[in-house]
Structure formats: C-alpha cells, structure tokens
Amino acid sequence: MSRRKRRHPEAPREARAKPAPPPASPRGRHRLVWRRLGGATAVIALAVVAGWTFRHSLPGPLRATSFPTSREALPVSRVARGDFVGSERCAACHKAEFAAWSASTHGRAGGVPPDVHVIAAFDGRPIRFRDAMVTPRSRGGAYDFLVAPDGDSAQVIHVDGVVGGGHMLGGGTQGFVTRHADGTYRFVPFDWSRAAGAWFCNTNSRANAGWIPITPRLRLADCGDWPPARVLGDAPRWANCQGCHASQLRVEGEGAARTTRFTSLAINCESCHGPARRHVELAERGRLTAADIGLASLRTLGKDASLDVCFQCHAVKDQLAAGFVSGDSLAQFYSIGLPALGERPLQPDGRVRNFAYQEAHRYSDCYVNGGMTCTSCHDPHSQGYRTITGIPLADRFDDRQCTSCHASKARSAVTGVGPAALAGPAASHTHHLPGTAASRCTSCHMPYLQQPETADPRTGVVAIRYARSDHSIAIPRPRADSALGVKNACMSCHADRSTAQLEADVRRWWGTGKPMPAQVEVQLRVAEARRRAAESARVAGSGSAAGMAPVSELLWRPGPPARPHTAATIGGVATYLELVRAPGDHPPPADVDSLEALARDTSVDVRALALATLHLTAGDDRAVRRSLVEALVHAGAHDFGLRARWALALGAKGDAWAEAGRPEDAAAAYRMAIEVQPEEPATWNSLGNAERALGDFTAALSAYAVALRHRPGWALALVNQGVTRLAVGDTAGAMSDLRAASESDPGEPLAWFNLGNIVLANGDLGAAADLFQRAVAIDASLADADFQLARINLLRREPGEAYLWLRRGLAIDSTNTAARALADQMQRQRSKRD
C-alpha cells in the first residue's frame, strides 16, 4: 500500500460554514503527505482556499534590483504516447530479461481485473463498521464493494484496478482503484494486509489512529479516503499518488475532457528504460549500433542519474511541473530534496521520520563517499539480490551484498560455538555467533522498521505490519537513535535491555564508532538545543523559544577536502527556512554570508532554498537583492528548475502562515514567489485568498483576474472570484463566475455548491436542492452540502429526509456542533413518536 499522501497531496478541504484557515499548497507528493490544494466556500463568509504549485518568472540586467525574465520555458514532456510499445514487444529479443521481469514484483505490481492476481478476501463476507456494512464481492472475474451505511441506501463501488500483491516481506498489502465520474481513478479506502489476513484502512487524516484493521468500533468516515478521493496519478486538485502505481500514467485534460491514461498497472520495461519505439524500429531495420541503440543506456549512467531512474517512484518528491512520463528528465519535473521543507519525511540522518521510500539512500556513506546505486545490490529485472559484480544471491539477507565491497568484514570460515567461533574477521566485527540472524549485515545496518506514520501517533501501537529497510545503511547508535524516536537495530532483538545498556555494549565493542557526518551532527545538535529551550520556556510559562537555539549552525558548509553531503545540506537549510518567524526577519550578517555561499552550491535544491531564505528575510536589502538577481542571471540551463524550487519554498512558507491564521505574512511570501515566477496561476490564486482574508477584496479580485489570465477557465479561481464578488455585493457577477466554473469543469463540486447557496438565499428551494445534490454526487465528503440539504428539507417540512442528510453530513464532519445538536433534537423527537 502506498502512503497515498499527503504529503505529493492535495485534497479539497471540506466546506465549513465559517471561515477556515487556508490549506497548504499542493507540493506534488506521493504526498502520499498530506497537504490540500482546494478549499470550499459558502455564501455565509465561507472561505475558499486553494493551494498552489509553481512554475515561471520575470527579469533585468546584472547589478539591477529587478528580477530578469525567465529564459527557460515551462518544461513540456518530450515523450508522446505513441513512443511507447509495451513490454510484450521487448519479449521477442530479450527473452531472459522479460522472463525475469514477468516474475518480479514490478511485473506483478498490479493489473486490471480479471487479468490480475487478487489476494484479498472478496468472498462475500461482510466487513462490519460501527455504522456501515461493506461487502467485498467477486463474480465472473469482476470485483466490487457493496457499501451499505446503516439507515441509508447502499452503493456499489466497482474495482477497476488492483495495486500491489502483498509482495513485500516487511508487510505486503493490496489496494484497489475505481473509475470516478470525472475521468480519474480513485483509491478505494479498504485495503488488504497479507500479514494480518485482514481488511484495514488509513485513518490518519480523520481519526488519526494510523493504519488499523476495520472492526465494528470504527466508523466508515474514520477511513480518511472515504468517500474515494485520492487520485491515481498527478492531479493537484485532489490528494493523489503521483505516477508511481502504473506505467506511463497521466491524468490528462481538464473539466469534462479529463481522463486517466496508463499502459499497465504493472511497472513495465519502459518505466525504467523510457520509450522504446525508436529502439524497436532500429532493431527491425538491423540498424542497431554500439553508438545508437535508440534508448538511453542505463548501464552507463552516473550514480545520480541511475538513482533518478528508481526515484521516479521510490522517493517522496515535490512536483515542479505537470506532464512527466518515463523518459523525461526527473529533475525538470520534480524535486526530491524539497520535501525536507515542511513535510520532512526523513530525520536529519536519513532515517524515516513519518513516511518515506528509499530516498534515504542519499544519506548512506556507501553513496556519499562511494558509488552505490540501487542496482549495486538489486537486479533491475528480477528485483533479486546480487553482489557488486552482478553475482546472483539467494536472498536479501546474504552478506555478500555488503562484503563484495567490504572484504575486510567477510564472514569467517570458523564454525562451531563458543570462543573459537568468534575468532574470524566477521565474528570479531559483529560480536555475534556466525550463522545466526544477529550476525547478518542487514540485521544491524538495514533492519526492517515500521513506517512511523502507519502506527498510532498517540500510542505507537502497530496494528498493520508495514516495515521497511530505510536504505540509509545506518550505524547503530542506541542513545542517538532513541533521541530521534527511531527504534534501534539492537532493540529489535534485545527489547529487554535499556538504551543505556545497549549504548554501553556498543561502546565496549566498537569504541566511539565512526563519527556522524558533520552536517547531520549539526542538525541533531540544533534540534536538541531547541527542544531544551522549548521545554525551559514551557516550564517558565514564557511560550515558544524558537529563536533561542543556535540555528546559524544549520548553514554550515564543509570546505575541501571534505566531500559535500548534499542531502544533509538540504535538510539543514530547509530547517533554517522553516524557523524564519516572519518576512523581513533579518538574519545576522554571518548567516547572510553563509546563505550567499550556499546559493552557489552545485545542488539546485540547496541553491533554491538558500535564495528563498535570503529573499524572505533580507530581500529588502539592496546588496542582498542584487545577489538574488545575479543568481538568476547566472542560472543558465537551470533557470526553470531554480525558479520553480525557489518559488515553491516561498509558497510553502506562505501556506504555513496562512494555515496559522497569518494572512498578511502569507501574502508577503506569495508576492515574493510571484516575483520569481509571475506566470504561475496557482500562486496568484493563493495571493487572492490571502488578500480576501485580510479584507482587501479589490486586491483579491485583481489577483484572481491575473490567475485566470494565465489559466483561462480555471474553475477553482472562478469559484474564488465568484465568492469574493458576492462578498462585495455583486451577486450577478458571482453567479456569472460560478456558472462559468461549472461549465468549464462540471466535476468541480464547489461551483455547484456555491451556486446552490445563492439560489437558496433567493428562496428557490427546489433549484438549490438540485445544485447541492449535484455537488454531493461529485464529492460525497462535502458535508456542508449535506447540511444545506437538511436545511432545505426542514423548510419543506420533511423531517425524515432532513434527518437523513444531517446523518450523512455528520458521518463526514462530526465537529459541526449546530448540526450535531439539531440531529440529537430530531432523534429525541423520533424516539418519542416511536
């Protein structure tokens, strides 16, 4: 099961009958993550908030203080759908590779019924919730869920795709997608765990209890993705899973033209190799040469380019531009580094903080100071294990994965038990008997650890096993691991021993051990200082102590001959930016110097974060301003990538301030992002939301107009503009905008919902009811539409229907106290009558 994040990201906030803080930006996560792009609006001062993603920008000459015009257009995929031929075309010439792939976890990663292996129990036995019965059924190779809420009509959710097959040793799962009326595929929130042999759901966005089995104690709406909302593929308007769970997956078009296309729900050959049409044509004509095979040779890639092939799916990442498909440049469309800002999936040393994939590989010393890639250990076709020289290994625990490089740690040939058995080089390193599980390299350096976000965040209880090796290849450090909240590798076997005892053992056997990378150690030290300062402030009753820690250390850069640790540098600068308290919060001169040095780093992620921090904190300083201009003048081929990341970082700060109820600071951050990328419509939309929250409706309308100039017919901006027109008394203009939104995108529920509010205010109950029902049919989680339908039925003197709509709304949003009180009152009246 994927994280189905958020965090890539972007589900609409349920409508509220009062102003709600703006949700964070859609930052393109697998994220799974989990931020929101849209907002919901009601006539009665209901704020519609939309997130943003960034794109483009404006210019000026060197030494000037206005930003130069962007020299690089928004990236467009260079790959057409017709460039792909499908894995079956590969089989004719590459029989061995095709056979290995077919049996692999990639080859069996999913499919469309009936041509897929379903391990979940679609046997007609009901899954009982507290307030509903869900029956998984199969008939003639077709699968569906019959969902019957108590006291309400049932609905059938067809299974149109299967994702996963329970393959993973640390906890395999299988999920399901259904085709939605708007052309997207949505994840069904009922997943199957092979280890537990049970149905479960993800409650983190609602009940906040982690991944838990479905039991009669759980409400249907406690499953965060109920009703089905999370989209398969990159669709920033909704929470989504990016393009990882299918091959050549794209959500194309908008509005009525929206459609989801993919080659296969398995991960096929061209997902890694890129489009093969030209390769096939050359082969058929006998024109293949060593210089031109019609494909990029993956064998000759450098270590970072090689990792990017796998990081298409095996990393949390932020979307910079839409349209990526295998064969495109990953770095043009996504950033793997910027999730360190805000989402922070990883700890400072690369271990998993909430939910991540294998991007912690970038923290491994084998990568930082060596040449380790994914294929150093994994056969790319079979996903089996191998040595650095390609010798196949029996399983994932074979020490030769490591000792083929670390020959001095090779297992001793000595056998037996007792002191003699500990005489060889391997035993003297492991301090455990040869042949035992504890003596394996992976037991200490790549233990299977439960993904933290899958456990109950309040208790740490794990209900559904989902353990993974994080690929940071960490050295066990019991005390440091405990401080981070990471389960130490030693503790996996020695749960009866304290952290202090385990730390003493480690020190006795290995001394102080290998030092942590300096940039990692700095972040840990700053985090500990901040924790202590915050605790002191709490005890003293003086509030937050955010400015009391030595945060300047986060900007430390190693000089030669030290090798730079790019991932840790990104983490340090991202943390520094997160700690900026307000726009114009000038850092000390030494920090400005450090940031300007980091703005010349070889990593575009590091440069962008440093520039965003300078812009946000000291952009009004003329000298700093000039350095920002120079960075864009010298951006060269990285112009778009630098601007997109820079603007994304500023927007993330704006989103955080908007969510915290600080629209003035949010607006300032959005304006800076617009300086960097003035043609990005979503940034203008976010600025309009902030201006409206400040009460400046004229400025808000101006911002929405610019958004619509850059993206004509954008339904969400039209909805926001319509609600703002209504706030200034322009009902006719509001109706015009909302009608235009509904025509541009009939699948935008907020257009119908807000039209319903205006029609209801005009007293037309029948027309209003039709509009609210249309909104609910598109987005059944829009609880305020249910409450408005309850109100209409009360006005019609139909209490039974009113009570039904109240219950539906409260099943999604039980926090609405007025609706809850009314439902309780109606229930008491019904009980008296009965």
Image: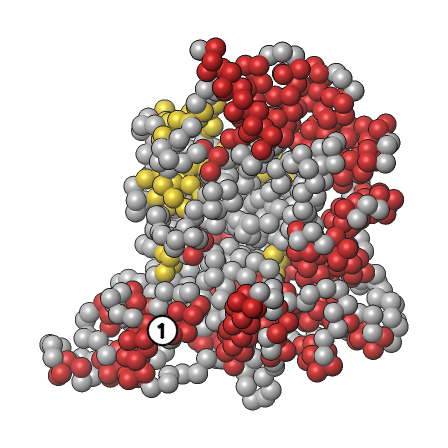
Residue 572 in the image, given as x and y percentages of width and height: 59, 72
What is the secondary structure assignment of the residue under circle 1? helix
Direction front: furthest residue: 540
Identify the residue at horizontal 69%, vertical 28% (top origin). Answer: 753
Using the rendered image of the protein, determine whether residue 345 is visible from the camera's viewpoint. yes
Residue tagged by mark 1?
478
- Which of the two residues, 105 or 652, is positioned nearer the viewer here? 652
Q: How many marks?
A: 1
Identify the residue at horizontal 32%, vertical 83% (top origin). Answer: 507
Q: Is residue 490 above or below residue 342?
A: below
- Which of the two residues, 112 or 539, is positioned nearer the viewer here? 539
Quadrant housing residue 434 = bottom left
Identify the residue at horizontal 50%, vertical 64% (top origin). Answer: 346
Residue 173 in the image, given as x and y percentages of width and height: 37, 45
Residue 321 in the image, given as x and y percentages of width and height: 67, 53
Which quarter of the image is occupied by the C terminus? top left
Using the rendered image of the protein, determine whether residue 101 is visible from the camera's viewpoint. no
